[in-house]
Amino acid sequence: MDKIEIKGYKSFKELKLDLLPINILIGANGSGKSNFLSFFEFLNRLYEQKLTEYVALNGGMDKYFFQGSKTTDAIEATICFKNNSYSFELKEGDNRFVFSKEKLGYQGSYYDIAAFDNEAYIKSYSGLARGEYIRRYLHEIKKYHFHDTGKSSPFTKESHIVNDAYYLYEKGENLAAFLYAVRENSPITYKRIVRVVQSIAPYFSDFYFNVSAADTVRLQWTDKFSSTVYGPTDLSDGTVRFIALTTLFLQPVPPKVIIIDEPELGLHPLAIQKLAGLIKSVASRGTQVIIATQSADLITNFNAEDVITVNQTEGASVMKRLEAQQLEAWLEDYTLGDLWKQNILKGGQPT
């Protein structure tokens, strides 16, 4: 994605933002970081023609309009990919969203495909060739969430070594099957994942795959000091999340976009440094990364232009990318993290 425009969605009255390979959002609690990330989840459900269900299960339509439907009567968005674009307008009708506009764009020309239905038409559209390009892109836009690491978390579930091995699910519930497939099909990548995990958990030896009669596996592992087989609940929360993050960023064929909220949660400072390296690595392979963080240690590892401040101004979220030239003198003696903690960066702080 090269550019995104949003109007009337949650805390965004009007937003125009250019996107780079790495986009790291910083800001106070409630500034709108999570709302921005949630838009991509909204976009994915829209593409999958599951928007009505998604909205109904997440609080109803009113919470999606900027300051409610009494203030805002439409949600508009345009997503640009090189010379292509996809745009839509949603309005309220019969207690459901209605697509009043839905368009494909190419080099400034737009083609209306709206069916004035409760679900988007783009997934079913079979006209212009550029529709296929946009469909493939929208299908891969997923927001990952690895925060749940409890006794009944997604990481404790069994997953099928065939049916659940195509791509890593958003909450990591197929992590075991996905890792098994990586080991079988991309052993070099698998060994790299194991080595990175060992770099922050020196006791970790390897994953243990015990395939059941039903072709399912659970996330299990062994350590370097015994023959005992352990499960995910025998790891710290931060280590489980780091395993999922390492797999996500090092997988053989990463998605076009990786979107994740506070990936540093529960990680040791050394693991945060490793995480920064993983983000840079996947970005160098052509995957766009969009992340929200509260970690000064994480942004210390990036360039100023990778960071976007998010602030609330008169009840609306405002986003602005840092400019390296404005911070050049400061960055000779301080890191980005230092400048953020000392409130020297313009934006990204409670006001």
Image (spheres, rainbow, N blue to C red):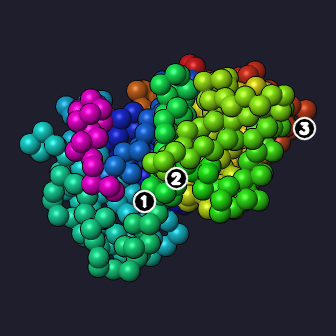
Give the residue type that dot 1 points to. Leu
Residue at which label 2 appears: 161
Label 3: how many residues lie within 10 Å, few (<14), some (14-19) or many (20+)? few
Q: Earlier in the sequence, mark 3 or mark 1?
A: 1
Residue 284 lies, in percent from the top left, at: 72, 59
**Residue 235: assigned label:** none
Question: From the image, which quarter does the C terminus lie in?
Answer: top right
Q: Image check: 138 left or right of 90?
A: right
Q: Name the mark nearer the viewer: 2 or 3.
A: 2
Mark 2 in CB contact with mark 3 (< 8 angstroms): no
Q: Nearer the viewer, residue 144 or 288?
A: 144
In depth, the one of 52 and 179 nearer the eye is 179
Relative image position of residue 316 (x, y in whole percent):
42, 32
Residue in the image at 24% along x and 42% along y: 53
The residue beneath circle 1 is 138
Secondary structure beneath label 1: helix
What amino acid is found at the position of numbered circle 2 in the picture? Ile
Image depth: mark 1 or mark 2 in front = 2
Which of the 4 quarters of the picture holds residue 253?
A: bottom right
Q: Provide the residue span drawn in magenta.
A: 47-66
Marks 3, 1: nearer the viewer: 1
Can residue 158 be seen by looking at this rendering?
yes
As for residue 201 lying within the magenta part, the answer is no
| Disc with the residue nearer the chain's start (2 vs 3) | 2
> How far is disc 3 from disc 1 in space, using C-alphas?
40 Å
Q: Quadrant of residue 128?
A: bottom left
Dot 1 crowding, Cα within 10 Å, few <14, some 14–19, many 20+:
many
Q: Residue furthest left?
A: 94
Occupied quadrant, residue 344: top right
For label 3, the residue is 332
Q: Residue at x 38, y 63 (%)?
A: 86
Residue 231, image x, y percentages: 62, 29
